[in-house]
Amino acid sequence: MKYDEFIDQVLKRAQLSSKEEAVRATKATLEALSEYISWKERHDAASQLPQGVKNYLKKPDVKPPIVADRCFSTVDQFVQHVSALEGVPPDIARKHAQVVLSIFRDALSEGEFEDIRAELPPELYNEFFAENK
C-alpha cells in the first residue's frame, strides 16, 4: 500500500471532505496509538506502512510506554487525546480512529499485528480492533 492509497481509504471510509482532513485523522490516531506500544513495535509496524504514514507512528519524542503506567487508562481518554490532536469533537475522533486503525490493521502482517495486540490494553483492542480480527 502506498501513502496516497492509505490516505484515500481514510478519506472514503470516514467520509471526509478533503485529503487534509484524512491526513489529520491519520496523524492524530497513529500518534496517540504510538503512546501505547514500545519503540520496537512502533519501528516494526512502521516498516510495513507507507512512507509518510510510518512517520506518524515513529514520532521520535514519544517515549516507550511502561505497561503499568499507560498514558491513557480508558478508551475515552484515548479518544479525548485523538480529539485534541486532530482538533475535532470526541465523537468524530472516535469514528476517525476506528477507520484509521482498521486500515492500519489491514496494512500489517498477522504476526506484527499480534505483537502490537499483546501490548495494547484489552479495552482499547476490543473497541478498535476486535471486529477486524
Image: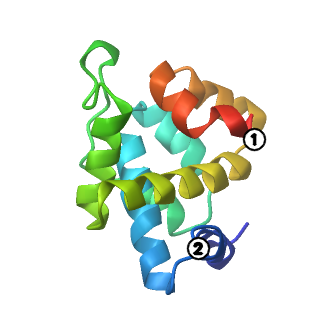
Left or right: 133 with respect to 16? Answer: right
When the figure is inspected, residue 29 is found, relative to residue 11, above or below; the finding is above
Left or right: 95 with respect to 130? Answer: left
Residue at 50 percent of width and 43 percent of height: 43
Residue 132 visible, this angle: yes
Would you name the residue on which mark 2 appears? Answer: 7
When the figure is inspected, residue 102 is found, relative to residue 50, above or below; the finding is above
How packed is label 1: few (under 14 Cα within 10 Å), some, or many (20 or more)? few
**Which amino acid type corresponds to the residue marked 2 in the rendered image?**
Ile
Q: Residue 50 placed where, x, y %?
A: 62, 65
> In what quadrant of the picture does the C terminus appear?
top right
Residue at 32 percent of width and 31 percent of height: 64
Q: Residue 32 placed where, x, y %?
A: 35, 47
Q: Mark 1 falls on what kind of element? A: loop
When the figure is inspected, residue 57 is found, relative to residue 116, above or below; the finding is below
Left or right: 8 with respect to 88? Answer: right
Q: Give the residue furthest to the bottom.
A: 18
**Which amino acid type corresponds to the residue marked 1 in the rendered image?**
Ser
Taking depth in this image into account, of 53 and 78 the one nearest to the observer is: 78
Q: Earlier in the sequence, mark 1 or mark 2?
A: 2
Q: CA distance from mark 1 to mark 2?
A: 19 Å
